[in-house]
Image (spheres, helix red, strand yellow):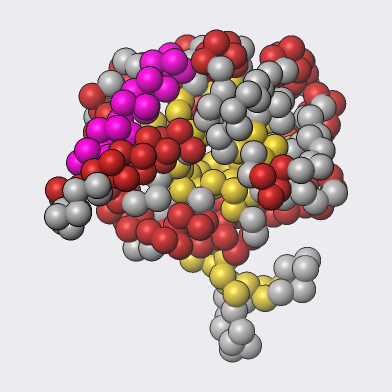
Amino acid sequence: MLVNMNELLSVADEGHFAVPAFNISSYAMFNGIMDISERKSAPVIIEIHPNELKHIGSDAIAGMVRRAGSSTVPVVIHLDHGSSFADVMAAIRAGFTSVMIDASALPFEENVALAKKVVEAAHAAISYTACYDDDDPRRAEVPDGDEWHYVPSAFNRYVSVEAELGSIGVTDADKAFGQVIHYTRPDEAVKFIKATGIDTLAIAIGTCHGLYPEGYAPELKLDLLREIRAAIADAGLTCYLVLHGGSNNPDGEIAEAARSGIGKINISSDIKAAYYTKMREVLADKGLREPNEIEPFCIVALQEVAAQKIDLFGAAGAAKRYV
């Protein structure tokens, strides 16, 4: 069952569970995540970063759409961390049912302006593309001065939009030194949602992308999460909250975040570490060269981690909640 993020997370919000968003970087990983989600009867978000999309190839999305559409569980195909308007428009054309525009590094008003521009296109299920032919009757002037024409979304209906406010940390040694984490403020979250009309908001409450170094103990600001959620509700707004950097965090804190209003939790490093650690073990047999002899072991390792996350987030068996 192929759905957008609103359709997926409205049910999760009512049921007080979170849906895992698994970043995949190959079609084998995609099939592995779909298989374990179906076995666990769990809704799932297939998440693909622009770098991963470049590696997989956008033509592969059509195959993912077909499998998701016939699946026994609800599935969102989501663009993770689109960094430009062009990134997002390409994803809409390819058939993604949800997109993220990440302009969180820009000043607040610029973040608002870009998110609002994406929302206007995505909610209308259209994708703007650059147009240089002056004779094309579809071209139109847009505020930034570029000329565009549009084509329909391959999903052909409302595409949901995620944005980010605040900053998610990183654990890479070459990037982490001197970084300053900007936590999401409840008042700014309300202002941002009102101004943009986004569907989901990635908030900064203390997580980092990647795997934490040994001896580092992250601590989520769960009180801040509850304050943000309460401020959104008090303002009469509907916007689902997202947690990036979900890998390698203490299980108790992640489970509490899921119960406290986080509807989507991103998992990338944990499943990839399991997959490629197993691959290194398998490749110790230098006689192996066929992917169908190597990758099944890696898929099982990935699925073991994914199954644990599905259970931890309270998503196991939740597919029955969706009609």
- Closer to us: 316 or 76: 316
**Picture residue at 64% right of the left edge, 56% below the top:** 83
Q: Magenta part mainly helix, strand or loop?
A: helix
Residue 254 vertical position relative to residue 30 in the rendered view, above or below: above
What residue is shown at x 55% (from left), y 11% (from top)? 252
- Residue 24 lies left or right of residue 5; in this view the side is left
Residue 272 inside the magenta-drawn segment? no
Residue ID at (77%, 73%): 145
**Camera sees residue 159:** no
Quarter containing the C terminus: top left
**Stretch in magenta:** 296-315
Q: Position of residue 55 (x, y in %)?
A: 42, 61
Horizontal arrangement in the rendering, residue 129 relative to residue 32 (left or right): right
Q: Nearer the viewer, residue 7 or 103?
A: 103
Question: In the image, is residue 303 part of the stretch drawn in magenta?
Answer: yes
- Residue drawn at 54 percent across, 67 percent down: 150
* Whether residue 92 is situated above or below residue 78 in the rendered picture: below
Residue 46 found in image quarter? top left
Out of 217 and 260, give the one closest to the viewer.
217
- Residue 271: x %, y % from top left: 40, 35
Residue 240, image x and y in percent?
A: 60, 27
Residue 63 can be seen, yes or no: yes
